[in-house]
Image: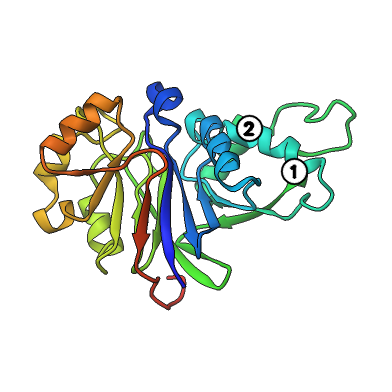
């Protein structure tokens, strides 16, 4: 059995059209296991790659470059009797109210009436972790805007996905302590909500930086600048082979 992380897109909000919305898919034996975030460009990339819609997603936070594709996914799912109510959405509980307000609360979700946005999905609220297809995942808060509005994801022993964040050395000391690859938000220059490469080089030890694969940057030129500094930088469509996840339980 093989595991991999496929980067659907690697750009920040301003570069989503050229670099793709920051999103990835955890694959098992080449098949999609879990999609992480669902921007418009990410959903398009998913359908192009797998010739199908996702049936399980984890949402890190609700900025539109990470959730705008959910509206299109709703319509494609709600009107398909074979899929309606079966597409799993794993959503951190403190993110749920924001997702409801931003995407699900539009009045008259279908013109004919009689439908709620959540009718299309199987909502699974999560706190510290969850089970998906007999595999345990961990969830942890990151530093992006206000507290408890953005979260990272760990497949223990395989990969950590930070989502949008400032440096989080205290979280990665706990949630990336088994040799995992760390897919990390990083641009050439940081800001109050996102990491820059100077931030990571200052706050992370060299062994951790060696396991980081950087995404959510602003341009191809910035990606090359990051590589010239000796860092691994993801490209849209790239597949990162993973170690098999550790057996365990949700913490």
Residue 127 placed where, x, y %? 49, 58
Residue at the (51%, 29%) spot, across then down: 64
Marking on residue 77: 1
Q: Is mark 2 on a helix, strand or loop?
A: helix
Location of the C terminus by quadrant is: bottom left
Query: Residue lying furthest bottom in this view?
Result: 247
- Relative vertical location of residue 21 with respect to residue 207 in this rendering, above or below: above
Between label 2 and label 1, give the one nearer the viewer.
1
Please state the total of marks drawn on the protein image.
2
Horizontally, residue 46 falls left or right of residue 5, namely: right
Residue 69 placed where, x, y %? 59, 34
Horizontally, residue 65 falls left or right of residue 168, namely: right
- Dot 2 or dot 1: first in sequence order is 1
Residue identifier under label 2:
103
* Colouring rule applied to residues: rainbow
Task: Look at the image and tell me whether residue 89 can be seen.
Answer: no
- Relative vertical location of residue 1 with respect to residue 209 in this rendering, above or below: below
Q: Residues within 10 Å of mark 2 (few under 14, many from 20)?
A: some
Residue at the (63%, 45%) spot, across then down: 51
Measure the alpha-carbon separation of dots 2 and 1: 15 Å
Q: In which quarter of the image is residue 86?
A: bottom right
Residue 29 placed where, x, y %? 50, 65
Residue at the (65%, 47%) spot, across then down: 52
Q: Is mark 1 on a helix, strand or loop?
A: helix
């Amino acid at each position: 059995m093989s595991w991999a992380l496929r980067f659907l897109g690697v750009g920040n909000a301003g570069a989503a059209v050229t670099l793709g919305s920051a999103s990835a898919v955890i694959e098992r034996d080449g098949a999609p296991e879990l999609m992480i975030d669902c921007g418009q460009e990410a959903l398009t990339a998913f359908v192009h790659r797998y010739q199908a819609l996702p049936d399980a997603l984890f949402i890190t936070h609700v900025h539109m470059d990470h959730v705008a594709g959910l509206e299109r996914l709703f319509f494609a799912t709600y009107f398909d009797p074979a899929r309606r109510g079966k597409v799993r959405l794993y959503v951190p509980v403190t993110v749920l109210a924001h997702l409801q307000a931003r995407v699900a609360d539009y009045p008259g979700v279908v013109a004919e009436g009689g439908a709620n946005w959540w009718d299309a999905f199987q909502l699974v609220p999560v706190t510290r972790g969850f089970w998906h297809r007999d595999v345990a995942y961990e969830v942890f808060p990151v530093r992006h805007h206000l507290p408890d509005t953005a979260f990272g994801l760990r497949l223990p022993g395989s990969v950590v996905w930070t989502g949008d964040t400032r440096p989080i050395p205290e979280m990665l000391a706990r949630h990336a302590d088994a040799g995992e690859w760390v897919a990390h938000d990083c641009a050439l220059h940081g800001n109050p909500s996102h990491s820059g490469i100077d931030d990571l080089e200052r706050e992370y030890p060299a062994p951790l930086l060696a396991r980081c694969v950087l995404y959510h940057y602003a341009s191809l030129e910035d990606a090359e600048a990051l590589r010239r500094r000796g860092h691994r930088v993801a490209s849209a469509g790239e597949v990162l082979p993973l170690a098999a996840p550790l057996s365990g339980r949700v913490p």
